[in-house]
Image: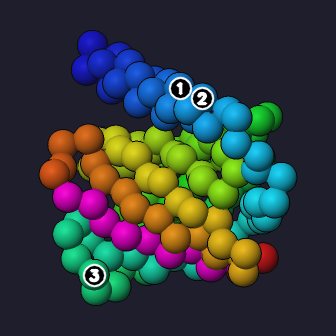
Amino acid sequence: MKQLQKRFVSIVMFLSLWMSCSLFADINFDMAPELRLGRYRLEGSALGSNIVSYTGEVDIAQHGENFLVKWWIGNTQSQTGIGILLGRTLSVSFYDDMKATYGVAVFYLSDYGYLKGYWTFHNRLMQGKEELTFLW
């Protein structure tokens, strides 16, 4: 039952992100750069901090119209997510594989091939920051 609740909440979060994207339907995103698929170097800060407190890698792969996103942080932590790209904004609903919790991340795609964004877990009041730099 608990697993079903987690899946339901993740689906609701994902659908709310998707529906919020409809607010931008009349904006022309033709000038947005293409999202590079592959591996990124990750530098992030913990909730409420501006200091880089963790590093890792992130893989981004095409999944139909969507994107599969996989984080590896240190030797023990990983997250798996599904994202929607709208213009320069990649919105990702993710599940933390070790902590058995879920959250949302929103990244801005720069002209220089990196992504800068914010994330939070479903039960937190603060946001963390991440920067992804394309590797290969």
The location of residue 87, given as percent across then percent down, is 70, 51
Q: Looking at the figure, which quarter contains the N terminus? A: top left
Range shown magenta: 126-134
Question: Is residue 135 a member of the stretch shown in magenta?
Answer: no
Q: Magenta span has 131? A: yes
Name the secondary structure under disc 3: loop
Under mark 3, the amino acid is Asn
Amino acid at dot 2: Ser
How packed mark 1 is, by other alpha carbons closer than 10 Å (few <14, some 14-19, many 20 or more), is few
Residue 109 on image: x %, y %: 64, 65
- Indicate whether 45 appears above or below 20: below
Question: In the displayed image of the protein, which residue is found farthest to the bottom?
Answer: 51
Q: Earlier in the sequence, mark 1 or mark 3?
A: 1
Q: Is residue 80 visible?
A: yes
Is residue 51 positioned above or below 34 on the image?
below
Mark 2 burial class by Cα count in 10 Å: few <14, some 14-19, many 20+: few
Q: Nearer the viewer, residue 38 or 13?
A: 13
Residue ID at (35%, 24%): 9
| Disc number placed over residue 19 in the picture, else none | 1
Residue 82 on image: x %, y %: 58, 41
Disc 3 and disc 2 in contact, CB within 8 angstroms: no
Question: Which residue is label 2 attached to?
Answer: 22
Q: Quadrant of the C terminus?
A: bottom right
State the mark number for residue 50. Answer: 3
Callout 2–callout 1 Cβ contact below 8 Å: yes
Q: Main secondary structure of the magenta part?
A: strand
- What residue is rendered at 79% in x and 34% in y? 64
- Is residue 7 at least partly visible in the picture? no
Report, in whole angstroms, how far the alpha carbon at label 2 lies from the one at label 1: 5 Å
Q: Please state which amino acid type lies under the numbered disc 1.
A: Met
